[in-house]
Amino acid sequence: MKRYLGFFLIAVMGGFVSLGLYKVFEKKQTIYYPKSESIPARQVAMYTGEQGTLPDLETAASVSVHAVVHIKSEFEKKSLVYDDWFQFFNFGNPTPHEYISPYSAMGSGVIVSPDGYIVTNNHVVQDAVNVTVTLNDKRVYKAKIVGTDPSTDLAVIRIDEKDLPFLAYGNSDDVKIGQWVLAVGNPFNLTSTVTAGIVSAKARDINILGSKGAVESFIQTDAAINPGNSGGALVNTRGELIGINAAIASGTGYYTGYSFAIPVNIVKKVVDDFIKFGKIQRAYLGVYFREIDDQFARDKGLSSLSGVYIDDIISGSSADKAGIKKGDILIRIQNKPVNGKSELMETISQLSPGEVVSVSIIRDGKQIDLPVTLISEADRTEIAMSNNKLLIYGATFEPLDDKDKSRFRTNYGFKITRIEPGKFSKAGVKAGFILLNINHQPVGSTQDLKEALTGKKGEVQIEGLYPNGMIAYYGLGL
């Protein structure tokens, strides 16, 4: 024990000696600890005005709500019914009677003149038997339908009143992606509702109107609209009308992110035509075209994706008379760039028959500017086309080839390869129809077709069949 205790005392003494030597040779040092301070965070964008300033939407809202109206349209659905179940199986002559089912729809409209003219969507009032307009101040009026245009989904109605508040037209060509807009309307019967958003895209074709001649070049926005907003106003921050709300992109039928408005430059043309002429004065260029994508550009050896490619020219049309040719690339009309169907249809829809417009094309790598005098779409009664085709009342006819004659067991007739707005589309004829007889007379030549359809008045009966073998008859009003 004495020996272990001695070892312990020696170890303790060694520790004290080491500590003493360290203190003797230690250098004097001062350690500084920085003071903890919070550094303020700030945004890094550079502002030319007051930071955080947003556009003033109150003025635009106060101006627009008084010029947007609530529309109630009443319709009648007619059907044939039998008095009872047993009458349907009557072994004599069952006599059904006509039954009328009333129903209604709600929408919005925009007052565009102080004397009562209101623009709305065609689908809000088309075929309505009664239209009622309620103003923002709760006054109620019966409205008269001035005109409807399914190809643009626009309609004009009028109420008998003066000195009404109205919205001034803006310029939809000046609308920029990202700018603030307001949507004003009556969703779910909630009158005078205002929502805000930004312009998300322009010249959108959402294929909602169906027909080939439809004008779809919507302004896309994320301002919320819902059922009942149709026909309402899309306005800029100055309170100017820049579009008529028409549709939403939704899997549920309610607003889920994007809505679409008809540009006001199209609206102005439709409203002016209905007020001045009672019908649309639609200009017609006379070209078949296709959009240019990367693969098509490689196939054709094109150096640019800009413009639209001219697939065919209708003989005698505005384009043909101006010297536009198949294979040309149309890049501008009236100095407005054209890069697709939407932009081309939108630009043409704003023009009138008789106008002379500048059309820029690319041919053999060189730009050519041509003056084009536009004709009226109504003047397209009969226009000869290239490749043995014929365009009559919006239907493009081609003679049956030997293969078709063998397939349909006939030695005469014509195939309708395209249907555009006109008398044939109005009668319900679809592309692919094989026309065999007109007024029970065989149509064996182009001359037969012309004589049977042009230069006459009244109704003619056309007979034929579709490629699936279904026989069809149509009454065509001339």
Image (cartoon, rainbow, N blue to C red):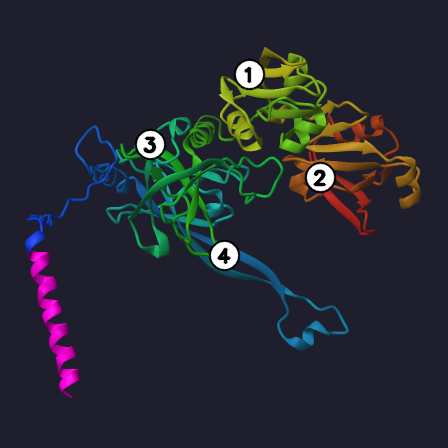
Relative to 433, 288 lies left or right: left
The crowd level at tag 2 (other Cα within 10 Å; few <14, some 14-19, many 20+) is: some
Instruction: State the image coordinates of residue 102 (x, y, percent, origin top left).
Output: 48, 60
Toward the viewer: 195 or 133?
195
- Mark 3 to mark 1 CA distance (whole Å): 27 Å
Mark 3–mark 4 contact, CB under 8 Å? no
Q: Is residue 238 magenta?
A: no
Q: Which of disc 3 and disc 2 is earlier in sequence? A: 3
The kind of residue tagged 1 is Gly
C-alpha span from label 1 to label 4: 44 Å
Tell me the SS state at disc 4: loop
Q: Quadrant of residue 307?
A: top right
The residue shown at (28%, 34%) is 239
Q: Which residue is mark 2?
A: 476
Q: In this figure, which residue is indicated by the disc labeled 3? A: 113
The magenta stretch spans residue 6: yes
Q: Nearer the viewer, mark 3 or mark 4?
A: 4
